[in-house]
Amino acid sequence: MRLDELELWNCFSYYPSVTSFDVLDGQSGKFLGKDKKWYPGAYLFTVDWAHPESNIVDTDHSEIPQEHKCAHIIALENGNYAAQPNNRIIWSIPSFTVRNEIPRDWKTQTTEWNVEDDRKWKTEDSDKFFYGIEETKDD
């Protein structure tokens, strides 16, 4: 198989991390190729990308929620290895998955979460480690 069939995207940053998800360890699945054919295989591990410093300009796709993709590494039954994103794979986990078709209600994550954007509280101005939190009043 061609490289662009086995991996759809270049890496998304120079800062990869490797994870092995226990729930997928050794599980079988299949991915939908560019040629609209399914390729079965077994999960090995996942490569994900995140920039270590979000204040640096051009952190690329790894920091944009709707563009973020990881690469699940799959040992294919045809002898190749593939690196495919979530939305190209259907896992076959007998105790968990119940359907064998492409989800029609697939949604893309577009929210940028930030818990520190609430202007209704502030911390006290002291050197205490366990500082108090005060509610602020709207002016």
Image (cartoon, rainbow, N blue to C red):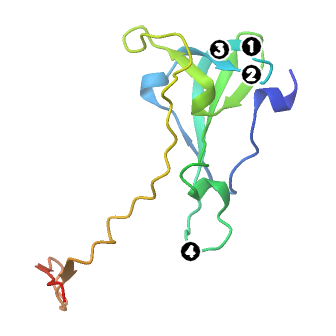
Q: Is residue 47 left or right of residue 2?
A: left
Is label 3 in contact with label 1 (beta carbons under 8 Å)? no
CA gap between label 4 and label 3 equals 39 Å
Q: CA distance from mark 4 to mark 1?
A: 41 Å
Tag 3 secondary structure: strand
Between residues 69 and 23, which one lies in front from this camera angle? 69
Residue at 61% in and 49% down: 67
The quadrant the N terminus occupies is top right
Q: CA distance from mark 3 to mark 1?
A: 13 Å
The residue to which callout 2 is attached is 33
- Tell me which amino acid carries mark 2: Gly
Is residue 67 positioned above or below 40 on the image? Answer: below
Q: CA distance from mark 2 to mark 1?
A: 5 Å
Quadrant containing the C terminus is bottom left
Mark in the foreground, 3 or 1: 1
Q: Which mark is residue 41?
A: 3
Please state which of the two labelled residues, at mark 3 or mark 2, is closer to the viewer. Answer: 2
Name the residue beneath numbered marker 1: 37
Q: Amino acid at mark 4?
A: Asn
The mark that comes first in sequence, 4 or 2, is 2
Instruction: Tell me how far mark 4 sits from mark 2, CA to CA.
Output: 36 Å
Cβ atoms under marks 2 and 1 closer than 8 Å? yes
The dot on residue 70 is none
